[in-house]
Structures are given as structure tokens and as C-alpha cells.
Amino acid sequence: MQGHKKPPSSIDEYIAGFPAEVQKTLREIREVIKTAAPEAEEKISYQIPTFYLNGNLIHFAAYKNHIGIYPTSGGIEKFETELSAYKESKGTLRFSLHQPIPYDLISQIVKFRVKENLDKTAEKQKKNKKA
């Protein structure tokens, strides 16, 4: 249920395109991500809200009946047990708009993704020094 005529240019614009109750949930998810990854940059990528820190960290989006969270497959594999109650596929989580959103779990996933991206960057820098 993307409520936009043209692609949004900011996360605020993206959120504004949805009904009030969905906006509230999207704002809460955004705040959870900002708190868990304060250094991350906000942007729109693939026409959805994205947080970027040494690469894409996490994306999120609203649909008719769910919120999609895209923490990459690594973020899903790490929390496989905790996520077993939710619909998932490679790199994608779906949280029903009719159920409580697991904000604490989203925070844990984001913190994991921050570490994953920072570790990946450090590893690349190590390799580049050796070359």
C-alpha cells in the first residue's frame, strides 16, 4: 500500500503518505533504529526508508497489512529463534499491523547489523593495508 504518487525524497515524506496509525508505527520503528544506530545516516533507497552506516544497515516499509523490515540475511539468521513467530524470507521480515511490533527485537537486530557493518569495514581496511 505505497501511498505515494512520486517517490518520496525523505523518510518524513515517506511516512506522511500513510494513515495516522501506520505513521505512528513507522515513526516508532524509525526512532528505535536511530537509538540503536545513532551514527547511521537516513536516506531513501529503493523508494523506502533506509539507514546507512558503512553500507546499507536496514530498510523498512509499510504495506496494507504489515511492516516490512529488511536487515539483510545476516540480521535474520542471527535472530532466527527470536523471529520464528514472524513471517520471514531471505533478508525480509514481516510484522503484522494487527499484532504488537517487537521494537526491542528490532533494536537488537539493528545493533547486530551495526557491528556486522563495522566489522566488515574493519576487515576490508586490514586487507587493504596488507595489499
Image: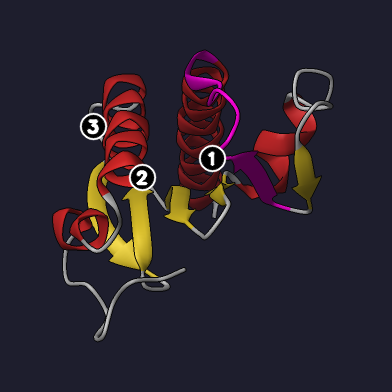
Mark 2, residue position = 22
| Residue at the image point whose x is 72% and y is 47% from the top | 73
Pair 3/2: label in front: 2
| Residue at the image point whose x is 70% and y is 40% from the top | 74
Q: Which residue lies furthest to the bottom in this view?
A: 6
Dot 3 and dot 2 residues touching (CB under 8 Å): no
Query: Against 21, is 103 above or below?
Result: above
On the image, which quarter does residue 9 sit in?
bottom left
Mark identifier at residue 39: 3
Q: Callout 3: helix, strand or loop?
A: loop
Q: Nearer the viewer, residue 55 or 89?
A: 89
User: As shown in the figure, which amino acid type bears the numbered disc 3?
Assistant: Glu
Q: Residues within 10 Å of mark 2 (few under 14, many from 20)?
A: many
Range shown magenta: 91-104
Mark 1, residue position = 97
Q: Callout 1: helix, strand or loop?
A: loop
**In x, y percent, where is residue 89?**
80, 52
Q: Nearer the viewer, residue 119 or 51?
A: 51
Mark identifier at residue 56: none
Dot 1 and dot 2 residues touching (CB under 8 Å): yes
| Residue at the image point whose x is 26% and y is 37% from the top | 27
Q: Callout 2: helix, strand or loop?
A: helix
Dot 3 and dot 1 residues touching (CB under 8 Å): no
Q: Nearer the viewer, residue 9 or 28?
A: 28
On the image, which quarter does residue 48 sit in?
bottom left
How far, Cα to Cα, is label 3 from label 2? 26 Å
How far, Cα to Cα, is label 1 from label 2? 8 Å
| Residue at the image point whose x is 67% and y is 44% from the top | 93
Q: Which of 113 and 25 is in front in this view?
A: 25
Pair 3/1: label in front: 1
How far, Cα to Cα, is label 3 from label 1? 28 Å
